[in-house]
Amino acid sequence: MLIISKIQYHGEYRIKVQFDYNKSLVSKIKIIPTARYSHELNAWHLAYNKEIYKALTQLGIPVKIITNDGHTKIINPENKKASTSLSHNGKNEHKNIDNSNIKNKQKNPCLNIEIHNKHIFIKTPYQAGRIKIIKSLKGAWWNNKYRNWIAKACIENIEILQKNFNYWDNENYKRIYDMVALRDDPLVLELYRTPDNIKNVWVKISGYRADIDFMKHIPDRFYDKRFKRWQIPFKQEIIDRIIEHYQKLGAKIINRLPGNDKSRFEKKHLSYGEKQEKLLRKFEGEYRELVKKVTDVLIAQRYSWQTITLYTGNIVKFAQFYGHADIDSANADDVNKYISYKASTNVSDSKLNILISALKFYYTKVIFRPDFEIERIKRPRKALTLPNILSKKEISMILKALDNIKHVTILYTLYSSGLRLNEILNLRVQDISFDRNQIFVHRGKGKKDRVVMLSNTLKELLILYTEKYKPVYWLFEGKDKQTQYTDSSVQKIVRKAAAKAGITKKVTPHKIRHCFATHLLDAGTDIRYIQELLGHKDIKTTLIYTHVTTRKVTEIKSPLDDLDI
């Protein structure tokens, strides 16, 4: 059945058409001139004139017409003479109106109530009692231009008007009530998965008069009372049946299942060849050939693109200092002279080490100079810089500082697993294993996979987080619900939590990683296990935490205690 009514949409009168979804009927509606679909109205709408009205009534199915004052009339294809017509000038001509409606008009003379979209339009002569009731409606205001009252179209206002004026008969009141209730609390079907139940699908049905009887007939279903959701097997035929059923009921479908096309979630990266061409365009003239020679070797040995750009830039700067692009004849003295010059400019030790690595790479792996005295190129003396570790109490204050569940989950994940910032951002829903109490780190630093523990406290938090945000592919999604969360956003979260906790030390995601390692060492965890958890290639990198742990210091007895005094 088609349900048609007159509406005012974007400043013009239109015919609104509603019906249960039917592919054949949609095709017929589409070919009628001026037919358009509106997501705002959740319905089709057409030009308001006789020709369009006639075309709608000739589609061969019953048509239910709703007039401006709430009256209804049904037109059957075989009995068109009993129809209610819409005239070209926009006025309604009523035939065979129910006696109940006539009685209502007699009870409320000169009162006219119309509902369009999100507003109620009320026309009435002045009566103190009646105006007092109208003023009590939510969002009520007087439109001086059109000489009528306008109020918000909500259930509370509908109930007040019916209780005081008894304007609609029972059938129309029920229809209007349902229409407003569905708009305020629409029927919604959500399908998603969570890390604790990755092999199944959660189905949540919400909204006014949500129909759950259909779900009771799905095989192998289970109802979760805690979150008011259904668990079903991850089978496409079952998922398709559920979607089709609720689409026919006019439900909004929110499908948060990943599907087969994973590429739309992955960042589109340029190939090494494309990146090389882009880099070469930055260097003109004599240095271009040098850049091509260096990048060819680096790409062949599969260095990361960040290393390629750092090495290339440093080698070109050395060539510029040397005087020309042909640096193949340079010797160790020339290189040491350049390193000495750079060291005098207050460059950091880390940048100086990158420069030395780049030049050593060039002479040993790019041009293979056997006579080049590589051992004469010395690195700067290493300074022992210790991380300023936060206490467990300070970490606890940071974790308790925020209320946003997504931000809190990110903080808990940082501290509970000791992951690097980019490793947190690269976590996928499938990387969280509740059964094995593990987090799988996919292609961490150095393109190496590893596994870290999954805290029981974090598991409980992840259940709440994934139920609210329903991530599809990345565990922590950006605003578009498709790409990864950004590193700057995580850094802001950490800074905000530290500031709210009253921590005056500089706190970063990497400092929380230092705290994770140190607190494990304080608790007696073997240094080799910590090395594996952190993904350190060299144990020397991990041993730095032995300088800041409190464990050994507290176990050593002071010689003062051995004196007999």
Image (cartoon, helix red, strand yellow):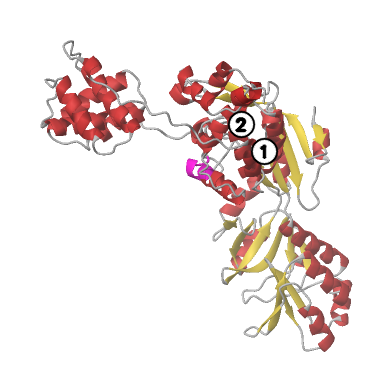
Judge whether residue 5 can be spotted in this image. Answer: yes
Tag 2 near tag 1, CB within 8 Å? yes
Residue at 64% from the left image edge and 56% from the top image edge = 43
- Quick one: label 2 or label 1, which is nearer the N terminus? 2
Residue 11: give x, y in percent of width and height.
57, 72
* In this view, 229 is above or below 115: above
Q: Position of residue 171 (x, y in %)?
A: 85, 64
Q: Residue at x 71, y 39 (%)?
A: 464
Q: Main secondary structure of the magenta part?
A: helix
Residue 349, image x, y percentages? 33, 31
Give the image quarter of residue 320.
Answer: top left
Give the residues in magenta: 485-491
Judging by the rendered image, the residue that carries numbered circle 1 is 466
Compared with 249, 431 (above or below) is: above
**Which residue is at the front of the view, 154 or 236?**
154
Q: Dot 1, how many residues are within 10 Å of its Cα: few (below 14), some (14-19), or many (20+)?
A: many
**Residue 10 falls within the magenta-colored stretch:** no
Give residue 118's mark.
none
Q: Position of residue 458 (x, y in %)?
A: 68, 33
Residue occupied by mark 2: 429
